[in-house]
Amino acid sequence: MATSDSTTTQVAAGPNAAAWLSVVGVGVVAATHIWKLPSALQQLQAELHFDLLFSGVLLGVIQVASMLGGLLAAWCGERYGLRRLLMLGLLLLGVGSLLGAASPDALVLLCSRLLEGIGFVLCTVLAPALIRLNCAPTELNRAMGAWGSFQGLATLAGLSLSSLMLDWTSWRWLWVAMALLSLAMLLPLARLVPDDRRARHTESGVRGQIVATARQPAPWLTGLGFACYTVQWMAVMGFLPAIYGAFGISALTAGLFSAGVGGVNIIGAVVAGRMLQSGRSPSVLLVFAFLLMAVSSIGFFALPWVQIGGGMVGALACAAVFSLVGGMAPAVFSRIGVDLAPSGGSVSAVIGLMQQLFNVGNFIGPFILAWVAVLAGGWQASWVMTCVFSAVGIWLVLLLRRRLTFGSRVESQGQASGAGAR
């Protein structure tokens, strides 16, 4: 399989760490719009009058655009330029957040989340290809490890910021602040990221790249494996402040604890990037991550921590392990994805297809977890969901390993960069 994007692209400045770090920053800001919601759910439910199941829909609906429009975003990026579409995504996030701040009812808030979802998909589908474009080959493992941490960074920032702001002001001002932050990110994106001067493509040429990519099994398997991670992590993190509320702590404390748990996801992503750089097998890292996510989720949900003295510490520890080892998955899957473009395909199309698949997990995860909790009368049976998806994830990783030699490709690049450093 060819590992290069077939689109002819020239960037005058060449590899540029400031450029790809700015793109990672855009991803963090985009994903923070997801995580401004969990800490605000109690205020929103009281003011706009909706139930737990609708809360699950609100948490997942921002992923609908990604679930349906990943390949369309890739087509637009190939046709009109990656940086230009990222800037449009930031604009849509800002407008959507301002609309949400003015919502008179739950329906308008839901529509604003859909608009934010369009901005989110533009920022996150095209970012890996733009990072690859502005990154030296020997730094690609590290750069994609940094990209893999964007959700963890966003969770830490989003839950912390929202918890602190909501302690003294309304959720509407939080939405306004997030809109302004999104618009402010346009400046570093415009100044630090070179314009990707892309060769003109006919509509049929771009369509051919997408078709060539979609015909290959590897992007599908990788995206489905990624979905087995996102379906769990989004669901657990989305309801974590509510789960911690059962311990009788304040909403601020629950939000900050949840932010800390989400933040350790960054460590897993960075560690995975370093391990890939040193030549470790991607499949081994992924199987390890899924196994520990399953075990730690059993500890978190099945044990009656609320009834145990000092149980809050045990619950925090289990959730932290779940998030930390889970952070390895997005870093490894993202790194695999940028090398899966077939001859005649494109990196953007691979990431777009993967994004559509793993955002199915982001969308349905909170709803499934809420449904299980309603059926069980509490969160105690939720480990069944996480363990099932971990098992399916391991199966998909092993299937992908048999079909491809992706491990040897990533390992060889890591070993080459290590030799260069020496």
Image (cartoon, rainbow, N blue to C red):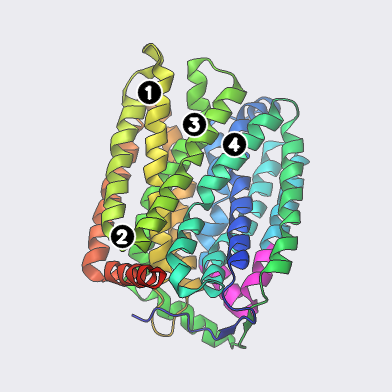
Which residue matches tag 3? Answer: 240
Quadrant of the rendered structure where residue 164 is? top right
Q: 163 and 373: which one is in front?
A: 163
Is there a contact, CB below 8 Å, between mark 3 and mark 4? no
Q: Left or right: where does residue 133 sit relative to residue 90? A: left
Q: Earlier in the sequence, mark 1 or mark 3?
A: 3
Q: CA distance from mark 2 to mark 4?
A: 30 Å
Which residue matches tag 2? Answer: 282
Q: Left or right: where does residue 326 sit relative to residue 258? A: left
Is there a contact, CB below 8 Å, between mark 2 and mark 3? no
Is there a contact, CB below 8 Å, between mark 1 and mark 3? no
Q: Tag 3, which secondary structure?
A: helix
Q: Indicate the amino acid at tag 3.
A: Leu
Q: Quadrant of the N terminus?
A: bottom left
Front: mark 2 or 4: 2
Q: Earlier in the sequence, mark 1 or mark 4?
A: 4
Which residue matches tag 1? Answer: 314
**Magenta span contains residue 28:** no
Front: mark 2 or 3: 2
